[in-house]
Image (tube, grey):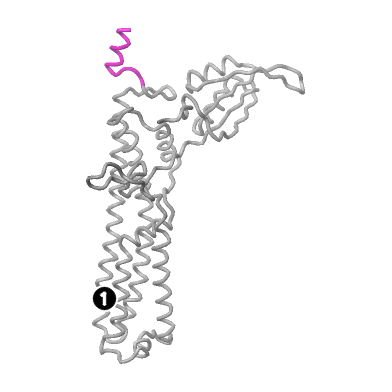
Amino acid sequence: MEDEKTKRAAGSEPVWTYRGYELHPREFASAMVHLFRGEISRANVWRQRLDATTNWAVITTGAAISVAFTEATAGHLVIILNTLLITFFLYIEARRYRYYELWSYRVRLMETDFYAAMLVPPFRPASDWAETLAESLLHPHFPISVLEAVGRRLRRNYFWMYMVLAISWVGKLWLHPTAARTLDDLIARAAIGGLPGMVVVMVGTTFYLLILALALLTVGLQEATGEVLPRFGVEPAAMGAGHGKPHKHAWFRPSRRRRQFMAIVVTDAKDQVADRILREMKRGVTALQATGMWTGATHDVLLVALTVTEVPRLKALVEEEDPDAFVVVTPAHEVLGRGFIPLRAED
């Protein structure tokens, strides 16, 4: 007993084993720290790219307005072209925001379920956080849709640039080079080449209405993790209040587990196959007796629950021990128990 305590105190007890590799507490913590730093670095790079795109849009907007009010006739066309240009910038920024959210999502996973778990009782992460992080690493996907990304960047930055351009466009048509006497004069000045002013005004109005609708309709989309929102759906309490209130759109990370399967192995080498699964894959095995209805012969059937990354290993292992085995791998909706999600729900 004393030797076991000494080994644990020295950090020699493995906390992570996989295919012959063993990670001890210090090594595991070091690996997580390096992963955290790497994801922070990538998130910062894409954050800088987001800022760069916004800067492009701001600079071109200012330049376009300056040029527009120095041109006597076609100045409003510069504003229209710049509106199309910042729309293109908005699309680029939304795409970059989705990449930023991917790295930010992983950072938030480690912040809430690895580092925070070290500080608050019961000092353990959520049961599915490792599976969620592993799924993101194995099968990267954007946490938010293009529509949400566009809506967020539009409301945060580009909506105000569109408003400045719209006001500048109307001001250009109305005041420069001389003040328009009537509304008809203002509309006539909006003409572009052979395109009547009324058509240009209608197209511009429709465009801005669509922009406004996009900004409003995407307010309820809250899949982004990079926003500063509470972890458990409760916003901070008001000053002096004793408790907070539910936040309608609070961030709560979605659970994503690696796809889970149930493998059914019909084999005449039960002991050899089961032993290797237990030793090498660290997965539990259940043995059943079955009878082949065609031949009437009895066979052993092994049941193994495993994840998508372990399926190839199982196939190779069974082939080495019993090339004549019969293997069925079927998707499992949910696997509960040791090595997967705890059967007992957490408090």
- Side of 119 where 145 appears, left or right: right
Residue 97 horizontal/vertical position (percent): 35, 54
Q: Quadrant of the C terminus?
A: top left
Q: Kindly give the residue lying farthest to the bottom in the view shown.
A: 181
Q: Nearer the viewer, residue 234 or 272?
A: 234
Position above or below: 300 against 168: above
Residue 175 horizontal/vertical position (percent): 26, 85
Q: Residue at x 37, y 89 (%)?
A: 188
Q: For residue 5: magenta?
A: yes
Q: Quadrant of the N terminus?
A: top left
Q: Residue at x 27, y 16 (%)?
A: 9
Q: Determine which quarter of the picture holds residue 270.
A: top right
Residue 59 horizontal/vertical position (percent): 25, 67
Mark 1 — residue? 65
Residue 73 horizontal/vertical position (percent): 30, 87
- Side of 236 where 339 appears, left or right: right
Q: For residue 146: magenta?
A: no
Identity, as a three-letter code, of the amino acid under mark 1: Ile
Q: Which residues are magenta?
A: 1-14
- Side of 110 where 142 appears, left or right: right
